[in-house]
Structures are given as structure tokens and as C-alpha cells.
Image: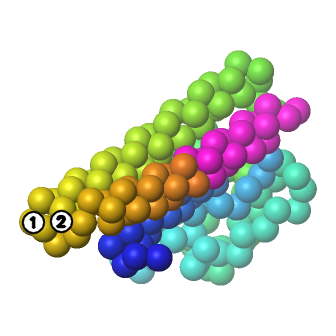
Amino acid sequence: MDSRIEQYEGKMKKSLENLKEEFSTIRAGRANPHLLDKLRVDYYGTPSNLQSVANISVPEPRVIQIQPWESRLIKDIEKAILASDLGLTPNNDGKIIRLTFPELTEERRKELVKDVKKKAENAKVAVRNIRRDANDSIKKLNKNNEISEDEVKILEESIQKATDKFIGEIDKLTDDKSKEILTV
């Protein structure tokens, strides 16, 4: 594989990884501890992620349990959850916070699938933009007589193959996430 192609393929891979990360934060009616990945809690003046100040577990399919290492953090954790866009109300017994996930309505599931498809489309656009940048740099190399017309064709074909591969992976990821959301 040409090193000139590898850098662009790396960027495409990054777009796919970002999409996976975004999908992991979309709740599908089941408790998923990754929904809390973006939450930050003030811990002795330092914004810290929840995983570094509490033990997070899933005791039941629709419940996330958060056990802070210090009980004084309960109020801060609850504040962070309420301020987030999770739409969940935390319950605590003084030691443990429980987040219960309600069943999603049919309408809400359809909204989530639309959101998934929108995020996927943005990822595809990013991959196509990377392809365009790669093709532009290939044409520039040819214009400066650094590579031949044959090399241009070979490099453009390689970029197109990479683009097709990543678009296919994005489509599969989108289908899987959509099925997960629509499964009652």
C-alpha cells in the first residue's frame, strides 16, 4: 500500500471510529454504561469522567447503577446527569445512584433511527471529502510531474476502494444500530 494512500485511509478510519463512538451514546432502550462516557463530575476542582470517580454496573437490562467512591459525590453526579441530554432522572439511596431506562415509544424509536441515519450520512460525507482531498493531492503530484498518468489511475483506484470499504462499513454499522433501536 502506498504511503500517500495510507494517510487518507487513516483519516477515513478515524471518521468511522467517531461514528462508532457517537452511536454508543445513543440509547436504545437498554442500559449501556457508555451513555455516561461524556459526563464530567467536579472532583476536587477537576472535571473528571464518571468512570474515574465511581463504579458503574448494569445489574438489570434497563438499569445502570453508579456507586461513587466517595458519598459526597452523589449530589455532583446527579447534577451532571440532570444537566446532560440523557433525559433520565437519577434515584439514590444515599450510597448508590440508579438510572432506570423507560421503554422507548414507537415514535421515539423512529426519531432515534433518523438521528442515527443523519450521523451516518455526516460520516459518509466526511469520508467522501477525504477521497476528494486525496484525489486533489494525486492530481497535484501529476501536475508537478512527480508521478505518471498510470500512477494517478492506480492511486485513484486505491482511494476509491478505500472509500467504498468505509462507506460499506458505515452502512453496516447504521443498519445494526437501527435494528437495535427498533427491537422491542
What amino acid is at disc 1?
Answer: Asn
Where is residue 73 drawn, in percent x and y? 56, 70
User: Which disc is residue 144 wearing?
Assistant: 1
The answer, for residue 171, to whether it is visible in the render is yes
Amino acid type, residue under disc 2 in the picture? Leu
What is the span of residues highlighted in magenta in the rendered image?
167-184
Residue 128 position in % (x across, y down):
39, 46
| Neighbours of disc 2 within 10 Å: few (<14), some (14-19), many (20+) | some
Residue pictured at 22% horizontal, 69% vertical: 147
- Location of the C terminus by quadrant is top right
Q: Residue at x 69, y 46 (%)?
A: 172
Q: Are marks 1 and 2 in contact (CB under 8 Å)?
A: yes
- Say which element carries label 2: helix
Q: Which residue is mark 2?
A: 141
Seen in the picture, residue 68 relative to 180 is either above or below; the reply is below
Residue 98 visible, this angle: no
The answer to whether 20 appears left or right of 175 in the picture is left
Asked if the magenta segment contains residue 180, the reply would be: yes
Magenta span dominant secondary structure: helix
Q: Nearer the viewer, residue 54 or 109?
A: 109
Count of residue discs:
2
Of 157 and 6, nearer the camera is 157
User: What residue do we see at 57% from left, 69% from top?
Assistant: 50
